[in-house]
Every structure is written in structure tokens, then in C-alpha cells.
Amino acid sequence: MAEEASEDPCDTGSEVEVLKQEYPEKVDFDHVKHGWELHEGEYAVDPKSLNARAVKLRQFIKDRPEKEVVLVSHGFFNHYLTGDVNEKGEQTTSWWQETELRTFTFVQDDDSARIQETEESRLHRDTSQDVLVLNRPKVRARASSLRE
């Protein structure tokens, strides 16, 4: 669910069967759906689909029995996960840095499992230096839609 938010080749995964052959017995693929790499349906990269996927992922994490969960994700998807995009899918907060660590808690009594960054996390990364850059990865036309 925490898959990237663009159709660029560097943001497109491999078929789950290929991954299972490449990483046998090292990765649990139970939650990887067939076709996840196609950027269609639930895994489409339009703002509506990305927001829906972010809500689903937050709810999945919230419903887990663990009190602390580590999530490794793609930077631009993190903006959807944290609710830091506008209605056009443009980020409304600064870029995440490479290997950046932020901590969040769930907003109480919220049906969409929204999260908020902890004060400790914000202080640790000195948000006073954040620079806002509105950005949305370009979504390229799919080869199949070009032939139609």
C-alpha cells in the first residue's frame, strides 16, 4: 500500500511472482496483491486513488496490535499518508529528506485514521527551516491509453 505515487520506471515495482523468486524466504508477500505494479485501480496514481490508499494503509497500521510500527515508504506517498497534499495532489509541506525519520501519532476519534507528527519529531528536524514547494509528480499517459 505504501507504493510510490508516480508511473515513472523507477517508481514501478515488479510482478509479485518475480519478487518471490528473487527473494525466497526473506520477505513475507502475504499482503502484496497481484497487479500492484500496474498502477491501476487501488494502485492508481491519481490524487483520489492515492488518498484512498493512504487512508487504507493508516487504518491497517492503526488496527495492528503493536503500539509502535516502523514504515519504510516512498517520499511523495508520505505526503498522502500524512495528509499533506491539496485537492490537486500537490504537496503542502516540505520534501522528506533521504532516510528521514519522523514520528506520528493517530488523531483520536477519527474515522480516516489521520495522523499528526509529534512535537518531539518536529523539534528534532527543526521545522523552522522547512521550505514549501508545491509539487506533483507528472503522471505520464500509459502506452495502452495512447493506442486507443
Image (cartoon, rainbow, N blue to C red):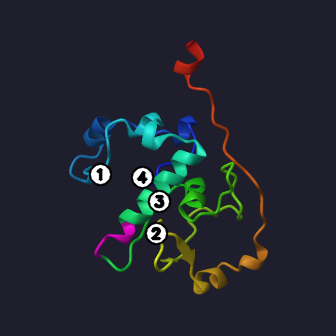
Of badges 2 and 1, the one in the foreground is: 2
Nearest the eye: 114 or 17: 114
Q: Which residue is mark 3?
A: 55
Q: Position of residue 63 (x, y in %)?
A: 33, 70
Mark earlier in primary sequence (2, 4):
4
Local secondary structure at mark 3: helix
Mark earlier in primary sequence (2, 1):
1
Q: Are marks 2 and 1 in contact (CB under 8 Å)?
A: no
The amino acid at mark 3 is Val
Q: Are marks 2 and 3 in contact (CB under 8 Å)?
A: yes
Nearest the eye: 98 or 65: 65
Please tell me how crowded label 2 is: few (under 14), some (14-19), or many (20+) other residues with Cα within 10 Å.
many
Q: Position of residue 11 (x, y in %)?
A: 53, 42
Q: Position of residue 23 (x, y in %)?
A: 28, 46
Classify residue 75 by image quadrant: bottom right
Judged left or right of residue 129, residue 27 is left
The amino acid at mark 1 is His
Of badges 1 and 3, the one in the foreground is: 3
Mark earlier in primary sequence (2, 3):
3
Location of the C terminus by quadrant is: top right
* Label 1, label 3: how far apart the Cα atoms are: 16 Å
Please tell me how crowded label 4 is: few (under 14), some (14-19), or many (20+) other residues with Cα within 10 Å.
some
* Label 2, label 4: how far apart the Cα atoms are: 15 Å
Local secondary structure at mark 4: loop
112 shown above or below 49: below
**Magenta stretch: dominant secondary structure:** loop
Q: Are marks 1 and 3 in contact (CB under 8 Å)?
A: no
Q: Residue furthest top?
A: 147
The amino acid at mark 2 is Ala
Q: Which residue is mark 4?
A: 1
Mark earlier in primary sequence (1, 4):
4
Q: Which residues are magenta?
A: 61-65
